[in-house]
Amino acid sequence: MIPPIADDNEGMYGGRLVPPLPPLPAPIAAVPTSRPGPAPSRARARPKQVITRLATDARCVGARQPARKDVTVRYATRRTATTTFTLQRRTGPGTVRSRCPARQPASRRERPAVYVTATARRGAAPRAVRGSRRLVRTRTEAAGTHRFAILRTFGVRSLKPGRYRLRIASRTSDDVRTPVRTVYLWVLKP
């Protein structure tokens, strides 16, 4: 036979041997079924283009048609900006042509390649002392339509045959940098 529990233990937990369970937490709110949008603090505003309507009158520099002796670039600016023009030459084999190539579809236009800033010889000093200068020009322009001839702007009579790209970077007066625009062209072998 089991001995009865003493009366002094009955008062500890109200007659039970284990402590009572804690109260249940407050009910959980219903979970929304739609996905929340992006966090507003992480969303970044993309800078607007300052340079618009970028076009050229030819794609090739050379003596044969449809190439031109100098390519003219036309563009418009939405507001006053300092614009930097950098002429870069593609390096590697197979970049020299004697005829202006046909237009390629957008998917095949430009494969990954290495471009370096083009250089030109300085002055009429002997070749050993001439050195070279990088083909980079910076201009400050008001809002409106602008144009320039590439060879004349960079002060060169000719360029080494190959594939080139003209990178146009602009910065507004309040120091906002806009995405770089690019124009590709060929300098043909004579």
Image (cartoon, rainbow, N blue to C red):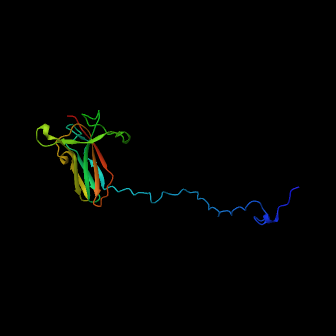
Residue 91, quarter of picture: top left
> How many tags in the picture?
0
Q: Identify the residue shown where x is 22% and y is 52%.
A: 138
Task: Looking at the picture, tell me which residue is in the foreground, 137 or 184.
Answer: 137
Residue 31 percent across, percent down from the top left: 60, 59
Residue 43 percent across, percent down from the top left: 43, 57
Q: Identify the residue shown where x is 38% and y is 56%.
A: 46
Task: Looking at the picture, tell me which residue is in the foreground, 47 or 128.
Answer: 128
Task: Looking at the picture, tell me which residue is in the foreground, 58 or 20.
Answer: 20
Is 107 drawn above or below residue 172 in the view shown?
above
Q: Which residue is the extreme one toward the right?
A: 1
Q: Which residue is the extreme one toward the left?
A: 125
Residue 8, quarter of picture: bottom right
Residue 7 percent across, percent down from the top left: 82, 65
Residue 20, quarter of picture: bottom right
Tell me the quadrant of the picture where the N terminus can be found. Answer: bottom right
Is residue 108 left or right of 73 when viewed as pictured? Answer: right
Tell me the quadrant of the picture where the C terminus can be found. Answer: top left
Residue 50 percent across, percent down from the top left: 31, 56
